Amino acid sequence: MENPIYDRLLPAPKNGGFHMDDYYIWCGSAIQGEDGKYHLFASRWRKELGFGPQWLFNCEIVRAASDTPEGPYQFEEVVFETRDRSYFDALNQHNPSIKYWNGTYYLYYFGTSYGGPIPEPGDEISSDRVIEVWNRKRIGLATSQSVYGPWERMGSPLLEPRTPGYWDCTITTNPSAAILPDGTTYMIYKSREYAGAPLQLGIVKAPHPAGPFERLSDSPIFKFDNEDFHVEDPYLWYADGLFHVIMKDDYKNNSGGLTGEWGAGVYATSEDCIHWSLHPSPLSYTRSVTWDDGTTTLQCNLERPNLLFHDGKPTHLFLATGNGKGPWEFEGVTWNMVVPLK
C-alpha cells in the first residue's frame, strides 16, 4: 500500500494558505461550503500579545474563504463571541476541526475559561497560571446548517477528563473526528496524567457526531518501547475499510523518533481505531518544503495537519507553519500553508 500523503505531495503555492499581518495564525481546517467556496477555520491571536502562552488566554477561531482550495484565504469573520465565564470555553477557543454530515456542519475545538484578569500585551504570565489555565482545556462542539453560521455551541464539554488515577485525568484537547456514513463517530483526543507528564492520545466512539462519546480503551492508543518517542496533533479519517491517521513526530532527546526528522508527519492505519500499525514508510510530510516558485525551505515547524477531501479522497494538506532558525523560533509570523496532493 502506497503512502497516501507523502507519495502525492506537490509544490506548495508560495502565495496560498491563510496569513494575517497583525495576527499569529495557527491550526487550519478546511471544507467546501454549500456555496462551492472553500472555508478555512483557523486559530488566531493578536501579534502584539506575543507567541508565548497567549494562545491559551486570548485566542479566537475565525473563518476565512477562498474560491480555490489553495487560497489565498481572506478573513471573513470571528466565529464565536466570548461568553459568561461560567462556560468552559468562555474566553478562549482554539484548534478547530470542521466536519459535515447529513446536512449539518460540526465544528470541534477546545476552549478554556479562567479567573483573574485577561492578559494584555506586555503582561507577565506566571508559569503557575499557565499550568492552571492549561489544565482547563476541554473539547467543545458547535453545529450549524450553514458554513456561515449561526453556530450553536454546547453548554458543556463534549468530552470530560476522567478521574485521577487514569492517564487522561487533566484535560481533553486536540479533537480529530472521523464520521462514518451512518453517523457513527470516532474521535482521537489528547491528555496527560499530571503537569509535566507525557502527552498521549486516546480514542472515543459515539453513535452520532454530537455524542455521547465513550472511551474504547483505558490506555493511550500509541505506545512505544522507547520512552523518547512521542506523537501529537493527530488527524483521523476513515476510507477503504480502514482508519487512517497522520500526526506529528514529536520525539524527545534526539532519539530520531519514527521518521528521523523532528516535526515531520507520521502515517499509520488501523482496523478498529485502537490497535495501530505504522506504514512501512511512515513519513507523510517533511519540514523541507518545496514551493511552486522552485525554492525549497526548511520550515521551523509544521503543526496541526489537516486534510481537505473531494469525493472521499484527500486532495490538499493544511499545516500551521512559520519561518525561523529552528523549532519555535518564529521570525514574527505564522500562517496556515497548503500543499496540494496529486
Image (cartoon, rainbow, N blue to C red):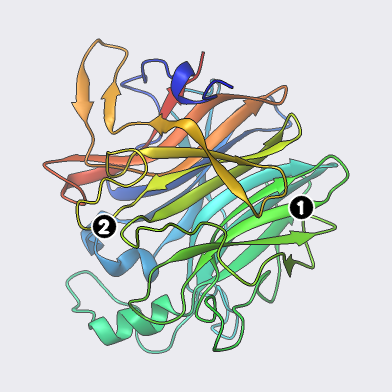
SS at mark 2? loop
* Residue 259, picture quadrant: top left
Q: Which is more foreground, mark 1 or mark 2?
A: 2
Q: How crowded is mark 1: few (under 14 residues within 10 Å), some or many (20 or more)?
A: many
Q: How many labels does the image show?
A: 2
At x 20%, y 51%, the residue is: 254
Q: Which residue type does callout 1 highlight?
A: Thr
State the residue position of label 2. Answer: 252
From the top left corner, tell me how far across and down residue 240 is, in percent: 74, 29
State the residue position of label 1. Answer: 185
At x 24%, y 81%, the residue is: 127
From the top left corner, tell me how far across and down residue 7 is, in percent: 46, 18
Q: Which residue type does callout 2 highlight?
A: Lys
From the top left corner, tell me how far across and down residue 245 is, in percent: 56, 42
Which label number is shown at residue 158?
Answer: none
Please determine whether, in this image, residue 47 is positioned above or below residue 136: above
User: Which residue extends farthest front?
Assistant: 225
SS at mark 1? strand
> In the visual, does 104 lie left or right of 253?
right
- Front residue of 31/9: it is 9
Please determine whether, in this image, residue 59 is positioned above or below residue 297: below
Quote the CA–CA distance across marks 1 and 2.
32 Å
- Front residue of 66/178: it is 178
At x 38%, y 69%, the residue is: 198
> In the visual, does 234 lie left or right of 45?
right
From the top left corner, tell me how far across and down residue 112 is, in percent: 49, 74
At x 55%, y 87%, the residue is: 165
Please determine whether, in this image, residue 68 is positioned above or below residue 96: above
User: Which residue extends farthest right?
Assistant: 182
- Inspect this view and state whether residue 81 appears: no
Choose the circle earlier in sequence order: 1 or 2: 1
User: Which residue extends farthest top?
Assistant: 294
